[in-house]
Amino acid sequence: MSVRVVIGAQWGDEGKGKIVDLLSDKVEYVARFQGGANAGHTLKFDDKEVVLHLVPSGIFNGDAKCIIGNGVVIDPIALVEEIENVKKMGFSLEDRFFVSQTAHVILPYHKILDKLKEKRRAKDAIGTTGRGIGPAYVSKVARIGIRMVDLLDKAVLRKKIEQNILDINYALENLYKEPILNANDLMAEIEDSVNTLSPYICNTSNILHEAIEAGENILLEGAQGCLLDVDHGTYPYVTSSSPTSGGACTGTGVPPTAITHVMGITKAYCTRVGNGPFPTELEDETGEELRKKGHEFGATTGRPRRCGWLDLVALKYAVRINGMNELTLTKMDVMDGFEEINVCTSYKIDGEETKTFPLCLDEVENVEPVYTTLPGWDKDISGMTNWDELPSTAKSYIEFVEDYLSVKFTIISTGPKRSETIVR
């Protein structure tokens, strides 16, 4: 039995979807454990390109059962649209797809509040996707959230919506000067989605416990990246959930003692979407070259990603807080053609050099990255599937990172397709 957690080791967009898709034909279950439709996992196979936001990335490769865990916040309308798209591609979800009855629901008012709050923050905006993720988690923590199981009882659902919009309407009318909401309209807006989703809603925690007891293999799929973790990331420029190995346990009900592998996914360089500190950001021609070569535009929002050199100080921090015992390196092919490649190996803070990732926002925003320069390669490595094919300088780059982190890369991605992969 193996229970492998797949985690973004940077600020998201590391290529987790491709790796989960790649590994899913060797497992019985794939479970998404946090986030919502703010995630965009892009998969490429059989000349198809698909972006999944809620359905686990294991749905297209093999027969694994796919679970949306209790830690995810679910927009029922968006989920139904995604389910229909999967079916149109010829993939069945019957007896393969399950939604946690205790996952919380994103309702239309969460999306309204998300956009209004970002607008109100003005220059201090966090850079959310506006899809209601943060407000839904606020409702959850405030104990006024609506869970998927509540969708199965219209009387319960109506009562909870009516209670919730009392405060929301007060804020809309008096704080934001916006039209107030009506419970009947909200119920009608999600009615069709509720009817479609009802057969999938169940006790997913029990399904996973029984799978562990039976010795079956499980993949736990994270969204975003651990440097966006609400506790361990660059707060307040973070997501509203825990995209860490700890979050995998709370977001599925799988106990920590069951986890056998923690796989961190990192690009061969760094990117970040939205606001927040980014020590190795390149606001020059090199940054633009990385963006163009790596097609660095958000799968969910289309926003251009900020780009920079690989940050090993931040990556070492990610390895430690997650207990990563294996790594995957993605977008290695994007580094083709650089005569020299810089890698951040320490920071300077107030003139003092350190290899410790600071937790104070002001310090992270003002660090001076210290780089080690490595030789690049002029060979096209895109699509390579064998370690021996790589140029010696590409191997040296990978081995340098491994030595710094004391963790090995078991998978190296040389392109976006499932087939463009080196497995060591």
Image (tube, helix red, strand yellow):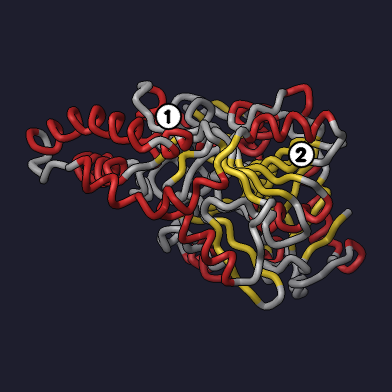
Q: CA distance from mark 2 to mark 1?
A: 31 Å
- Dot 1: element: helix
Residue found at x 66% / y 66%: 91
Residue found at x 22% / y 48%: 185
Q: Position of residue 86 (x, y in %)?
A: 58, 64
Q: Position of residue 413 (x, y in %)?
A: 74, 60
Residue found at x 89% / y 65%: 386
Q: Name the residue carrying label 2.
A: 4
- Dot 2: element: strand
Give amino acid for label 2.
Arg
Please report contact status of discs 2 and 1: CB closer than 8 Å, yes or no.
Answer: no
Vertical comparison of 196 with 172: above or below = below
Residue placed most toward the observer, 347 or 304: 304
Vertical comparison of 25 with 109: above or below = below
Quarter of the figure that contains the N terminus: top right
Residue placed most toward the observer, 299 or 182: 182
Task: Answer yes or no: is residue 348 visible.
Answer: no
Mark 1 Cα within 10 Å, few/some/many (few <14, many 20+)?
some
Horizontal side of residue 15 vs 305, given as left or right: right
Disc 2 or disc 1, which is closer to the eye? 2
In the rendered structure, find residue 361 and report the number of the disc placed on it: 1
In the rendered structure, find residue 92 and report the number of the disc placed on it: none
Horizontal side of residue 397 vs 99, given as left or right: right
Image-quadrant location for residue 140: top left
Q: How many marks?
A: 2
Task: Answer yes or no: is residue 395 visible.
Answer: yes
Horizontal side of residue 300 vs 255, given as left or right: left
Q: Residue furthest right?
A: 388
Give amino acid for label 1.
Leu
Residue found at x 49% / y 33%: 241
